Image (spheres, helix red, strand yellow):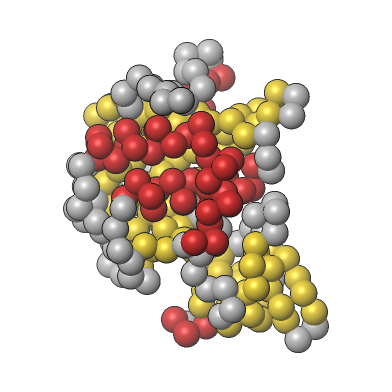
Amino acid sequence: MCMSFPPTEVVDQATSTNDLMATRWRRGEASLYASIRARYQTHGHGRFGRIWEAPRDTALLYSAIVSTSQTPSRLPLSAGVAVIEALDSDGLSLKWPNDVFLHGKKLCGVLAEHIEQQGNTHILVLGIGVNLTACPPGAAKLDRDADALAERITASLPHLDQLFARYTNYLQGVGKSVQAIKPDGETIHGTATGITEEGALVIETPAGITTVTAGDVTLKETL
Ligand code: BT5
C-alpha cells in the first residue's frame, strides 16, 4: 500500500527541530509522522549536548514524530538505512550508532530522542541532519534538493522497524579493529563483530565479548 503524508513543513528558523517537534507532540499539536525542516537552527544539537553546525540553507535539518514497538535503540540505525536509501549514491555507509558516512567522512547524524511510551509502543522524535552544500572541516556533503530528500525520508517512516534488517548491507567496521568510548569515558579496544538485536555494538576483546549500547566508535586505521 502506498501511503502519502502531508509535505514536510518548512520553517525559517528553529532552536532545534527536535525540540520543536517534541514540544508540539507534548502539546497535542503534532501527529504521528508529522515532519518539519528548518533552514537554520540556532541550537542544533547532537548526542550528549554536542553542537550540530549548519550554515543557513546548506543542510537538511529535519525532525519527525515516529513510533516503534521494537527496542528504541535500534532506531538510529534504521533511520541511517532510510537516509542512505533516500540519498541513493555510491560511497555511503553506516557508522554505529548514528552516523551516515560518505567516502569515510561524516555526512549525516541521527538523533533519536524518546518522548513517551504508550503500552508497548515508544514515541520518539527522530532528528536527521544531512550536509548538502556545506560541511565542517573533515566532514562530507552531498548536493541534494532538501525538500525532495525530506519527502523520501518521510515516506520511509512507517517502515523503519523493517529497515533495521538492512543495516548489514551498509554497516562499516565489522571485522575491523575499533576503539569504542562509552559515555562514562571507559575505552574498549577490540574487533567489531556485529550488532545485537537491540542495536548494541559487539566487540571482541582479549578479555572476551562485550557489548556497547551507547558511545562513539572509531576505526583503528583512521586513528
Ligand atoms: C549526531 O550527534 O550526529 C546527531 C546530529 C543530529 C542533528 C539533527 S539536525 C536536525 C535535528 N535537530 C537537532 O537539534 N538535531 C537533529 P553526535 O553523534 O553526538 O555527533 C555530534 C558531532 O558531530 C559534533 O560534536 C561534531 O563533532 C560533529 N558535527 C557537528 N556538526 C556536523 C556536521 N554538520 N557534519 C558533520 N559532523 C558534524
Say if 220 sits above or below 137 in the image: below
Residue 69 falls in image quadrant: top right
Residue 183 seen in the current view: no
For this rendering, which residue is in front, 98 or 93?
93
Please indicate whether residue 150 sits to the left or right of residue 192 in the image.
left
Residue at x 65% of width, y 62% of height = 195
Q: Is residue 207 above or below residue 102?
A: below
Q: Residue at horizontal 57%, vertical 42%?
A: 162
User: Up-down: is 7 above or below 192?
Assistant: above
61 vs 160, left or right, is left
In this rendering, the answer to whether 117 lies above or below 210 is above
Please state which of residues 180 and 203 is positioned toward the viewer in this rendering.
Answer: 203
Which residue in the rendered view is the most extreme toward the top? 28
Residue 56, how many percent across, how many down? 21, 43
Residue sitting at the far front: 1
Q: Residue at x 62, y 74 (%)?
A: 192
